[in-house]
Amino acid sequence: MKLRRSFTWVLLVLVGLAALAYANRLLLLQYSLGWYTDFRFPREANHPVPWQAGPASADRPASQRPPNIVVILADDLGINDVTTHGGGRAAEGVPTPNIDAIARAGVAFDNGYAGAPVCTVSRAALLTGRYPWRFGVEFTPTPGAMGRVAGVMYAEPNRLHTVQVDKAKAGQIKDFNELGMPPSEVTIAELLKPRGYHTIHIGKWHLGSTPEMRPNNQGFDETLFMESGLYLPEKDPRVVNSKQDFDPIDRFLWPNMRYGVSYNGGQWFEPGKYLTDYYTDEAVTAIERNKHRPFLLYLAHWGVHTPLQASKADYDALPQITDHRRRVYGAMIRAVDRSVGRVMQALREAGLEENTIVVFASDNGAPGYIGLPEVNRPYRGWKLTLFEGGLRVPYVAQWPGRIQAGSRYRAPMSNIDLLPTLAAAAGATPPSDRVIDGVNLLPYLAAGGPVQPARPLFWRDGPYRAVLDQGWKLIVAERPRKDWLFNLAVDPTEKHNLAASEPQRLAQLRALLTAHHAGLPAPLWPTFIEVPILIDKTLDQKEAPDDEYAYWYN
């Protein structure tokens, strides 16, 4: 009898726990990614990175070697966050002198475009010189668990346009690590290795995390890999946090992000200091280790992506900014700009600056979901949109003696142009067995060189697409079913939609879109979330019936 009663009590407790778990299933799912990470990837304490050492001495002067190449990519940095392009935050005490110095020593691309308004697709374009939808990379990798909680997380009763979630497709999504760039693609690192380059990746990758998709199998000899997305642990005394409770993505990131990196596929370990500064320290060390041989350094910062976290030292340096969120964000920009300055100083100290190509850019425009309306001014739109605010990014480069100092490049250029340009500088040849969409910009960057011929640029996110050709830009959307046509030559801020008044131009650009997208392969993974993005308001601002919007597909 006692045994039966004990069994009954155990059963009741189990049923109660099951009922409690079911009642809180969305909360459990929201936190599950972080718990899974802790269980599967335990982190070691910080330890030195065993960077491979190049030759102890040079066999020839740096000026007689192929140029070193340094690509520094910020994450979600808006064009108005950099003084060179938009005035930036200098009035708030957050100028970007080190990024600006690259423009003074080289070129500012006045019409520099991201390969996509979102990170994964844009980065794939940068590394391959191709439109990523040619090889099925069209959407940002998203954990399938997000599909199970997105409907509730995005359930805003006051929103006029609702988030669409296809739970069936979400359940079919592969493991998050398997979503990325196929290893059959040829990256700039793979092109440079046969030319004697030592190739290094530091920071964010976001192009797949299986061994086949990681940097070591995509041409990089060494990778210091960002495994998760905290700049410092949330409660670390060296960090100042800013949480955006109005943003479902922010609410998902905080409980699930961790503080960890790995080297060449090894065990996770803690970076040891504020992430932007840590990556910079390691970049400086890598430059010193390789100063006697040609190298490619791809420094892919996490800054200034959410979660918004500033080092306390940078936050304390900006007491004049009274708004907490704005101050944290400004401090993050300060850290990225300081990183650029330290990398440039390392090149100078190693005697490499004169024979090094340095490119700085952002992967896409700044997002509206951080609630800072000025980040992409004067342009409309945000990250995730095909308006100029989502696509135009800070883009500067220098190569002393080859790029005229203080020059402004007027023709539209994009991430797809980096591979052919850098390959030409290194004496490498892009692959001939596939379409390379970018062009070599070196002839047009030379003093007295020709003007780049006009060519169309394309963007694609499911049925949400855009083309820019000879100053005219067409954006087409399925949700809402609408065309936007702008003459950027006279309306660079996209205020006047000419779709109704310019039917011939509309038809011409539509034909370009149709021809470009014909016969392209299906995406490697489906979209299962469709999110409405207001074009002219940040996420924390109240919607109005006449607000323009477009759906982003992910």
Image (cartoon, rainbow, N blue to C red):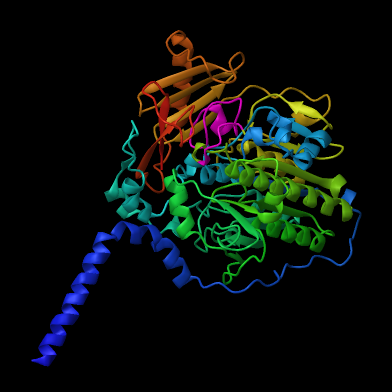
Q: Nearer the viewer, residue 546 or 46?
A: 546
Secondary structure of the magenta portion, mostly? loop
77 vs 42: above or below = above
Quadrant location of the N terminus? bottom left
457 vs 354: above or below = above
Q: Which residue of the protein is positioned furthest toward the left in this rendering? A: 1
Q: Is residue 384 magenta?
A: yes
Q: Residue at x 41, y 35 (%)?
A: 519
Q: Residue at x 47, y 40 (%)?
A: 133
The image shows residue 56 at horizontal and vertical percentages of 86, 67
269 vs 532: above or below = below
Q: Which residue of the protein is positioned furthest toward the right in this rendering? A: 61
Q: Residue 81: name its quadrant.
A: top right
Can residue 76 be seen here?
A: no
Quadrant location of the C terminus? top left
The image shows residue 530 at horizontal and vertical percentages of 36, 39
**Residue segment shown in magenta:** 370-392
Can residue 43 be seen here?
A: yes
Question: Left or right: 83 with respect to 263?
Answer: right
The image shows residue 62 at horizontal and vertical percentages of 88, 52
Question: Left or right: 27 with respect to 134?
Answer: left
Q: Is residue 385 magenta?
A: yes
Question: Left or right: 316 with respect to 481?
Answer: right
Q: Residue 472: name its quadrant.
A: top right
State the count of labels.
Answer: 0
Q: Residue 75: name its quadrant.
A: top right
